[in-house]
Amino acid sequence: MSQSVGPESRSTSSPAEADRDAVRVRGLCKVFGATRALDQVDFTVAVGEIHALVGENGAGKSTLIRILSGIHQADSGSIHVAGRPARFGSPREAIAGGIVTIPQELRMVPAMSIAENLMLGSLPLTRRLGVLPAIDRRRMNDEAREQLARLNLDVDVRAPIRTLSFAEQQLVAIAKALRRQCSVFILDEPTAALEAREIDRLFAVLARMKADGTAIIYISHRLDEIVALADRCTVLRDGRVVTVRERGQFEIADLIEAMTGRVTADEAADTRPPGPELLAEQTKDAPIQLHAGQTLGIAGLLGSGADLKVRGLFGAGPAPVSVRAANGGATLLKRPGDAIAQGIGLVPGTRSLGLIMNQSVRDNILLPNLFQIGSIFRIDRARADALVNEMMDLMDIRPRRPDIRVGSLSGGNQQKVILAKWLARRVSVLLLDEPTHGIDIAAKMHVHALIRRFTHDGGGVLVSSSDLGELARLCDSVLAMRERQIVGRVERADGMNEARLRAALERTR
Amino acid sequence: MASGSVSSRLLGQIPLVTLLVLCAATALMTDRFLSPVNLNNILVQSSIMAVIAIGMTFVIIGGGFDLSVGSTAALSGCVAAMVMLEAGIGAGVVAGILAGALVGLVNGIVIAYLRVNPFITTLGTMVLVRGLVFLITGGAPIEGDYGLPSAFVGFGSARFLGLHALVWVPIVLLLVLSWVMHATPFGRHIYATGGGREAAYLSGVPVARITASTYVICGALAGVAGVMLAARLQSGQPTAGEFYELTAIAAVVLGGAALHGGEGTLYKSVIGVFIMIVLGNSLNLLNVDSYWQRVAIGVVIIAAAAADSLRSKR
């Protein structure tokens, strides 16, 4: 295990240097039940610094952020904000102390106007007829417009906020935070749902905030972003700080090694010739033809329609889809049951659509398999238990407890349960939509390994993803999709990498 | 379902503990509570409500809601009585249950296939069916010139193995339907549909058919309860079953089923029924003013719903 260098060297820093620290955390501990979520964590963010916080799920990032933003309280240790000791009892106190968090899921009131959402909590008031308190709409709208103009967002602030894209809503959330004069700004996975252009705009805003002296804590699973953006990076593992590195002292591979505690080597993709056809779209140009042993990708960002394409091939789109299935005959897929009968399984992009969250791991794995392990009148308990145990071992689902509620598992383990459902059904085609979105590196690698094993054993995989690096590593062939149209195709034989995929995606038709 | 920890198992037994505490407290305050006549009374009252609550539990676990069961029970009782007078007991009983199932089928089709809100749909059928009952009966009880067949009326007061014959109906239904819920694909599909409709759909569960069938079961069981009620009242009463839907829903919630669907157990809903009936009975025995009784029952319903919401927050 590599030792932490950063915190120790800084803890002995002179008082003058300490004043440059926007946030100084020392010896922070937090225990939940039997888990040590944070164990003697030291963490320092300087004024005008972008400080990345990375680690696998469960490493303690969220706990640290939640303590800083007043949601949880630490068991021991100290927090100083701008040199003064701070202990936040609630999110309100943290905001008053100058720490503002932009969560992954924005909390907006969809039907209220952009200006109202921006100003909510401190709406400007006026008095009608000298006495009646009322919202001063003109002042509210003017102020909102001015705030958004500073972020180069030119929109009609009177329109309902639901008319904005996610990226624009995020800017509104940032504008709202800036109004509160924050000195520390926390972003939790801000780019998970953004397009390349929107990411650039966000980074420009962050650069300006940094120049104004705001300290920024940046959390992301996308390590390429962190290498490009962060001045410093703190890596957490199992509740401890593993290492703190300055800009230029870390590369993606170093970070992965620090996060997982092991050296990583990318497995080479299988390059065997494809086997017999498993699934083909019955349309004029039939862009999607999937063969045994093949992984076909659809690259597309949010709103490109890649997810709808995948859903459609599962019979869950707005209209039935005609396909040629493994037996060579044409089949009309009207509902998911039709696709499942053809040996097709879907892993949806949203995990709550792949799992019944309040039910057990066992019930979820069995759901598409009930008729296979019994009859219409009876579920064979012994066969069910055997199947569930086999799948939990195969997928390495932790903890190995079939009766636990699936909603209480980590994101990575939930994803494995969804895959287990279909592997238990012995499907020949897996349709995957954003299979590793929001899960940690180790779980991601495990999912990738499972996909490779599945195709190696003669299955076919169709995967849609906005993570182009993932597609480049996994796929034999990738279709680029924009505005619901296929706009390009990249084959592994012609050389496949992230840059080529990005180029294919951004090429105008 | 249950995560299996000690605390969650204890939480799961709250309905039973509540019932036992309620019974013990009432027994201490009045010796009339434990008298055979009173206990028998409680059992018979509970048995009719339990049949309705079992049906309601199917609908609520499936993620739905049914306000029409009280009206449906009245319809089934009257249809059963009318057919019975013309064509015999067997035909009457079957016709009554079928009438209930038919109301359930209408609810199910409108809710599952036309995707109309279940609250509004069953509010509609609740009023509509009550209107139909008054239309077919002309507002008068159905008892014929010489009363309903004596074998039928006899069933309403007969005893079997020491228990009132009516009490056996929910016992048998509970055993059979609990098995359906837990050991058949159909039952697991109901839990899955209520727990996450879209996720269940994407797992190949025919969610519309499952939802519709929960309403058919609920309607048919309301029909069974209506026939039981007719045997007990020795007539088909067009005004029977008023507010049964509210008592049944309250009982299901008291029994720990989640109103958002996917969670619940049939036998616990029956315990919920006992809580409601025993509470009413004990307030009666203690000579509590009937207006105050309503207030008390209202408080219990809200408390149960609050407990449900606190539990799901944990």
Image (tube, helix red, strand yellow):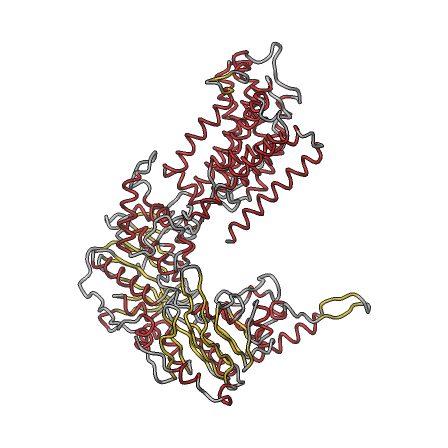
**Residue A457 rendering spot, x and y as whole percentages:** 20, 56
Q: With A277 as the anchor, is B227 left or right in this view?
A: right
Quarter assignment of residue B287: top right
Quarter of the figure with residue A308: bottom left
Q: Is residue B195 left or right of residue A297?
A: right
Would residue A509 be seen by someone viewing this image from the given angle? no
Q: Across the whole image, how many numbered discs are drawn on residues?
A: 0
Tell me residue A164's x, y (percent). Answer: 54, 67
For this orientation, the residue located farthest to the front is B28
Vertical position of residue A210 compared to residue B61: above or below: below
Image quadrant containing the N terminus of chain A: bottom left
Q: Is residue A288 visible?
A: yes
Farthest-out residue, top? B146
Foreground residue, B189 or B130? B189
Where's residue B252, x and y in %?
Answer: 53, 38
Which residue is rendered at x = 54% and y = 22% of the image? B228
In the picture, which quadrant includes the C terminus of chain A? bottom left
Closest to the observer, A359 or A82? A82
Q: Nearer the viewer, residue A495 or B11?
A: B11
Q: Is residue A254 above or below residue B288?
A: below
Residue A25 screen position, x and y as percent: 47, 77
Work out whether residue A349 or residue B160 is closer to the camera in this orientation and state it. Answer: B160
